[in-house]
Amino acid sequence: MSKISVKGRDITIVSQKEEDYICITDIARYKNADRTDDLIRNWLRNRNTIEFLGIWEQLNNSNFKPVEFDGFKKQAGLNSFTLTPSQWIEKTKAIGITSKAGRYGGTYAHKDIAFEFASWISVEFKLYLIKEFQRLKESEQKQLGWDIKRNLAKINYRIHTDAIKENLIPKELSKQQINQVYASEADVLNMALFGMTAKEWRGPNSDKKGNIRDYANEWSQTGMVHSDPDYVQLFLNI
């Protein structure tokens, strides 16, 4: 679950089957905080809305019931016609809209549908919503990229230590002697990339958790980590 702020309103976003669903109850609060359910029902009874939802479901939902959809479409626009999110979901087996109970309860819609609802509420709000949503996605991608790099660094480090164990450590060494070899070889890697041993780094960074490699990203931003591709490749082949 994530939250973004759009024109002073917190908008909740949840992930469902690797898709983003935005709380349209939160969006409705921008228009009228006391009548969010009424606003959503009024939007649902609109013929253009029904047609949009039906086409979206037909494109994305193999279990969607087109007969029930046609029934709603015929009634849309009549003064007597009413429709709630739960009725739409139950009758058509729709997946584009969902209702959640509890602390973060409300009506959620797939981002495609949520943007359409936001446009009905306010074109200006929709544009700000899209901008903040894109900002969130860019931030998540950057974090994902860093996590991948960090995990690859851990894997490479394990490869190095395994290679040391298999090729550099005599079988007759004691456990204490083996640990000393590991520490020595690890510091060869640390010196190659950071210009200091783990012990030298720990001194002025005693308040930090983890080890020197956990802060490699900060070092790279300051230009203190070697970035030449040939040098890094040489390091990986040690």
Image (cartoon, rainbow, N blue to C red):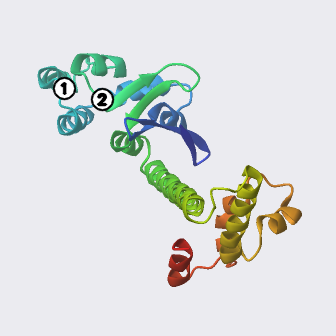
Residue 72 appears at what percent x and percent y? 19, 22
Instruction: From the image, tell me which residue sits under label 1.
Output: 63
Q: Which mark is residue 95?
A: 2
Q: Residue at x 65, y 70 (%)?
A: 189
In this view of the protein, which residue sits in the foreground, 54 or 101?
Answer: 101
- Residue 29 is left or right of residue 45, and the answer is right
Q: Residues within 10 Å of mark 2 (few under 14, many from 20)?
A: some
The residue carrying pointer 1 sits among few (fewer than 14), some (14 to 19) or many (20 or more) residues within 10 Å by Cα, namely: few
Asked if the residues shown at circle 2 and circle 1 are in contact, with their CB atoms under 8 angstroms apart, the answer is yes
Q: Amino acid at mark 2?
A: Ile
Q: Position of residue 3 (x, y in %)?
A: 57, 42
Residue at 77% x, 64% y is 198
- Which residue sits at x=53%, y=72%? 236
Residue 61 vs residue 189, the one in the foreground? 189
Q: Amino acid at mark 1?
A: Asn
Name the foreground residue: 114 vs 3: 3
Q: Secondary structure at mark 2?
A: loop
Residue 24 in the image: above or below residue 213: above
Corner quadrant of residue 89: top left
Distance, label 2 to label 1, CA atoms, is: 9 Å
Going by the picture, which residue comes out furthest to the front? 172
- Rendered-image quadrant of the C terminus: bottom right
Q: Residue at x 48, y 51 (%)?
A: 133
